[in-house]
Image: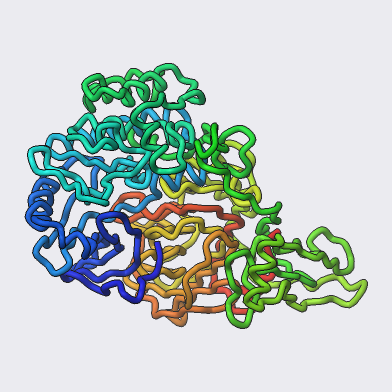
């Protein structure tokens, strides 16, 4: 997700455009808001395609056909205007990472999850083909992992089976490496072409790379047409056989989507429920030896996804709110510090006094030569020093004041229990991966990871103040992502979260939201605090120790429910799952003053 470009429209067809989600051969895709406030995905067709004879009439027929696709694993068409100066199409917005992003961040999926993914995608193809459509561009980036299973998106180049082709000179439809042989050869295609693409998607999910490698377009397409796919690392016989059958060169020898559904149910005892497609849970999906959940290196030159570079070991946010006597902070590579303060990064130091030793300890933090060159190029200092020095031999000052009523450090190593370090509100963890997030933090997958307590921790009823604090490391700014919330009837009584519609950090209550001053920096530790001051009827949001937003509280009459870390509740359903790392969640049963919030932030990343 990115900010709108200067030449992007701000609205189209009555839909407000908020962010750019991506672009492809057919057009640009935006996160939009309907007149009634619903989040939607808006695709605007490239103007160059309008020069193609009969494009509008074909596009109109395809929109009508796409409306007939109503399966559980597709994104339904809501609105469209093929006759607009810039033709557009609106579908439901699916909140969740793409399969491409999930595999890139987490590595290959375990066998059971791949079977579950296959079942959901096969059911989607049943719906698509039942509407007499061929998708023609099934690939990892067009598969979203929603909370209740995968979704196939982007029917932008789908073709009515009986209709004319959309091919044109110099314009390639589909994505090399995920095309079928007949598609790569420019031949007539039908539903079996989508099955071949499904096979490449499943191979990608299981291995972390394309079974035909990558590289130059011509050589890649040659391998798709002539070579045997590389499935050596798919160790489960049933899964390897299924993928091999989908990748048959002869379309007539490929299984139908309904046959794939039947084989998924019998595949090695695989769990077929769509929620199992999420790359998370107790069963590790990390390739052995890949640091931090990075995907494995390619099996041949260009044959797989490269492992993402891993930052040097980073101290994590801890529970102790002791201010550091001296902290040297280094801007994260690719992120500039906010004006007037140092941006929190992976290079925070443990407070010198936290271990009980006397005196202040200084350490120099280094960044890579590449990052140093980038920083030097724009004239940013290599290190920013926050001066909180104690005199030699003095014990660092320790803050006094309210104590938290709940503290979840989230530093467990295994199991389903998230311990409350100060009270009796232990949480139950689901699909949280301990110790494999940024520098060993708990990792939340943005799809199903969550921690819930057995009952309420905070009293959020009218007249009751409270404060929520957490360290977060956001990896994906797609939709809403909630760090901490607490249930109330069928929705949450408060939300400390990233707001995808505003592209800001937010602290919200039903009917009111206060926002941060600037977009968040991804892949950077950030300290967030939400304060509900009942006496003043105000909500405050602090980002890295600075108050950035204030709003008047609506004082909702709420019935408290369980406290949740990593998601929220809306309409009785779990929503807004967080993608990234969370550390040291603390809640207080009163409104903390600004100086106390600053002390929490100065406790640093430990």
Question: Is 279 situated above or below 441?
Answer: above
In this rendering, position of residue 520 left or right of residue 355: left
Residue 23 or residue 342, whichever sits in front? 23
- How many numbered badges does the structure rendering display? 0
State the scheme by which the image is colored: rainbow
Q: Which residue does the image show at 54% across and 74% down from the upper left?
A: 542
In this rendering, position of residue 198 left or right of residue 223: left
Q: Which residue does the image show at 13% across and 59% down from the upper left?
A: 80
Spot occupied by residue 55 in the image (x, y as percentages of width and height): 12, 56
Spot occupied by residue 485 in the image (x, y as percentages of width and height): 44, 59
Residue 387 or residue 79, whichever sits in front? 79
In this rendering, position of residue 130 left or right of residue 220: left
| The quarter of the displayed image where residue 596 is located | bottom right
- Whether residue 316 appears in this view of the structure is yes
Q: Which residue does the image show at 67% across and 56% down from the upper left?
A: 316
- Whether residue 146 appears in this view of the structure is no
Question: Is 379 situated above or below 444?
Answer: below
Spot occupied by residue 587 in the image (x, y as percentages of width and height): 55, 62
Q: Which residue does the image show at 31% across and 74% down from the upper left?
A: 7
Residue 135 or residue 125, whichever sits in front? 135
Spot occupied by residue 567 in the image (x, y as percentages of width and height): 43, 53
Question: Is 111 situated above or below 18?
Answer: above
Q: Quadrant of the N terminus?
A: bottom left
Q: Quadrant of the C terminus?
A: bottom right
Question: Is 37 situated above or below 254?
Answer: below
In this rendering, position of residue 482 left or right of residue 144: right
């Amino acid at each position: 997700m990115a900010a709108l470009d200067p030449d992007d429209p701000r609205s189209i067809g009555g839909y407000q455009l908020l962010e750019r989600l991506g672009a492809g051969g057919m057009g640009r895709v935006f996160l939009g808001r309907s007149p009634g406030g619903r989040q939607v995905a808006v695709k605007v067709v490239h103007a160059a395609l309008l020069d193609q004879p009969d494009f509008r009439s074909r596009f109109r027929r395809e929109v009508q056909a796409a409306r007939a696709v109503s399966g559980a694993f597709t994104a339904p068409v809501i609105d469209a205007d093929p006759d607009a100066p810039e033709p557009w199409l609106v579908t439901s917005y699916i909140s969740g990472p793409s399969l491409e992003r999930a595999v890139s961040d987490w590595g290959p999926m375990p066998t059971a999850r791949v079977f579950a993914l296959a079942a959901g995608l096969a059911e989607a193809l049943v719906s698509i083909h039942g509407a007499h459509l061929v998708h023609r561009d099934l690939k990892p980036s067009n598969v979203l992992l929603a909370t209740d299973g995968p979704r196939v998106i982007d029917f932008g180049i789908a073709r009515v089976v009986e209709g004319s082709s959309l091919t044109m000179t110099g314009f390639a439809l589909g994505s090399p490496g995920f095309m079928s042989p007949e598609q790569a050869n420019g031949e007539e295609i039908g539903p079996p072409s989508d099955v071949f693409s499904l096979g490449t998607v499943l191979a990608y999910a299981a291995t972390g790379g394309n079974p035909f490698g990558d590289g130059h377009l011509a050589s890649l397409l040659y391998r798709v047409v002539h070579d045997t796919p590389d499935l050596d690392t798919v160790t489960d016989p049933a899964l390897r056989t299924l993928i091999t059958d989908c990748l048959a060169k002869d379309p007539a020898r490929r299984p139908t989507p309904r046959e794939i559904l039947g084989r998924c149910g019998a595949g090695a005892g695989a769990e077929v429920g769509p929620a199992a497609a999420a790359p998370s849970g107790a069963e590790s999906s990390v390739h052995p030896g890949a640091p931090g959940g990075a995907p494995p290196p390619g099996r041949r030159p260009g044959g797989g996804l490269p492992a993402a570079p891993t930052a040097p070991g980073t101290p994590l946010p801890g529970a102790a709110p002791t201010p550091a006597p001296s902290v040297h902070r280094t801007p994260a590579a690719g992120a500039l510090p906010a004006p007037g303060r140092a941006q929190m990064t992976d290079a925070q130091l443990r407070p010198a006094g936290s271990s009980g030793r006397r005196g202040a300890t200084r350490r120099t933090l280094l960044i890579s030569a590449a990052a140093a060159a980038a920083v030097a190029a724009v004239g940013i200092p290599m290190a920013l020093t926050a001066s909180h020095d104690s005199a030699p031999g003095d014990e660092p000052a320790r803050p006094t004041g309210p104590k938290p009523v709940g503290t979840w450090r989230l530093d467990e190593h295994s199991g389903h229990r998230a311990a409350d370090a100060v009270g009796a509100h232990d949480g139950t963890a689901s699909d949280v991966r301990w110790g494999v997030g940024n520098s060993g933090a708990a990792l939340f997958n943005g799809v199903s990871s969550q921690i819930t307590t057995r009952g309420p921790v905070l009293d959020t009823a009218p007249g009751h103040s409270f404060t929520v604090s957490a360290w977060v490391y956001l990896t994906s700014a797609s939709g809403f992502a909630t760090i901490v919330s607490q249930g109330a009837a069928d929705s949450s009584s408060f939300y400390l979260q990233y707001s995808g519609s505003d592209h800001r950090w937010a602290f919200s209550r039903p009917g009111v939201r206060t926002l941060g001053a600037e977009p968040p920096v991804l892949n950077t530790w950030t300290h967030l605090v939400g304060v509900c001051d009942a006496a003043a009827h105000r909500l405050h949001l602090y980002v890295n120790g600075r108050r950035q937003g204030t709003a008047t509280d609506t004082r909702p009459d709420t019935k408290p429910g369980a406290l949740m870390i990593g998601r929220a509740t809306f309409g009785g359903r779990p929503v807004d799952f967080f993608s990234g790392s969370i550390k040291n969640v603390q809640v207080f049963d009163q409104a903390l003053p600004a100086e106390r919030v600053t002390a929490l932030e100065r406790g640093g990343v430990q």
